[in-house]
Amino acid sequence: MSAAVSRRVTVVTAVHAPSARYLPEAHASLCAQELPPGWEWRWVIQEDGRTDEVLRQVPRDRRVTFRQGRPGGPGVARTIALSHADGEYVRILDADDRLPPGALARDLAALEADPALGWATSRVLDLLPDGSTAGFPGDPEHGPIERGAVLEAWKAGGFLAPVHPATLCVRRELLLALGGWMALPASEDTGLLLALNAVSRGWFTGEVGLFYRKWEGQATGQAAHVDPVERAARMAVVEARARALAALRWGHPVGG
């Protein structure tokens, strides 16, 4: 007889109509995950808006919760989805991305092994339209990431984070304490990453933890994403928040 399930990781996905067609692939990658005994996953999908297109792509699976709401961007959608996240950990999965086998188990192994870690990230491969993949140069060493290290590397590297925020697996209580994702039209996940690193140590897994799809409709590929005035404002508030949190000298674990 298998061990009773008592612990959970909640996977949170924001989706809008153009990316809904990829939900079945994301679901298949979740179904391929093998978790340690006593663990299960639940998937909370939050549509950024109310349309008919998304519902048709939502898998019929008892482990899946689907909700709709007024549009506010992916950060707002993910934060609203937290109302249905009841696991100890929250793992981000964008609607158009896929998890490789073992990704969730590796996140859990890192965070369960060290209660002082607040979050985990992993290596990413771009998934190109022809089905091939491409990696990123300059990944950090497999292992812990000290507080403040991501902010300094991000600033020195021209606002490019050394780890990918789309791979975040976070302790739910810490995520709630930080207010979820930033209320920005973009870079909301980078803002969360820097805030997490301002108050806690993290972990980087050198094995691939995400296939990050590149396609013509993704938000980061649109002209508005690189508008220089808006981008400068986003970067300024992301940095200011992280530095303000660091200056408070509050940390995870409390007193850490």
Image: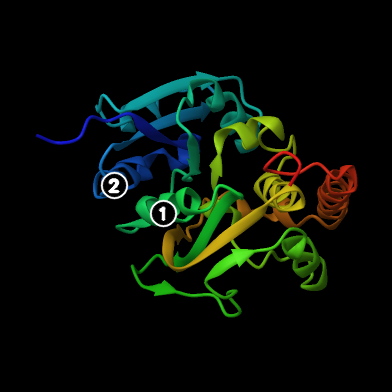
Q: Nearer the viewer, residue 212 or 246?
A: 246
Query: Disc 1 residue type?
Result: Ala
Residue 98 visible in the snapshot:
no
Q: Nearer the viewer, residue 56 or 113?
A: 113
Residue 158 relative to residue 107: left or right: right
How busy is the neighbourhood of tag 2: few (under 14 within 10 Å), some, or many (20 plus)? some
Query: Disc 2 residue type?
Result: Pro
| Residue in the picture at 14% in, 36% down | 2
Residue 172, given in percent of the width and then of the height, sits at: 56, 34
According to the picture, the residue beneath numbered tag 2 turns out to be 36
Res. 30 image quadrant: top left
| Residue in the picture at 54% in, 57% down | 121
How busy is the neighbourhood of tag 1: few (under 14 within 10 Å), some, or many (20 plus)? few
According to the picture, the residue beneath numbered tag 1 turns out to be 109
Image quarter in which the N terminus is found:
top left
Farthest residue in the bottom direction? 137
What is the CA distance from the residue labelled 2 to the residue labelled 1?
9 Å
| Residue in the picture at 38% in, 24% down | 65
Res. 185 image quadrant: top right
Whether tag 2 and tag 1 are in contact, CB under 8 A, the answer is: yes
Residue 46, given in percent of the width and then of the height, sits at: 49, 28
Residue 113, given in percent of the width and then of the height, sits at: 47, 53
Residue 24 relative to residue 144: left or right: left
Res. 139 image quadrant: bottom right
Q: Nearer the viewer, residue 49 or 245?
A: 245
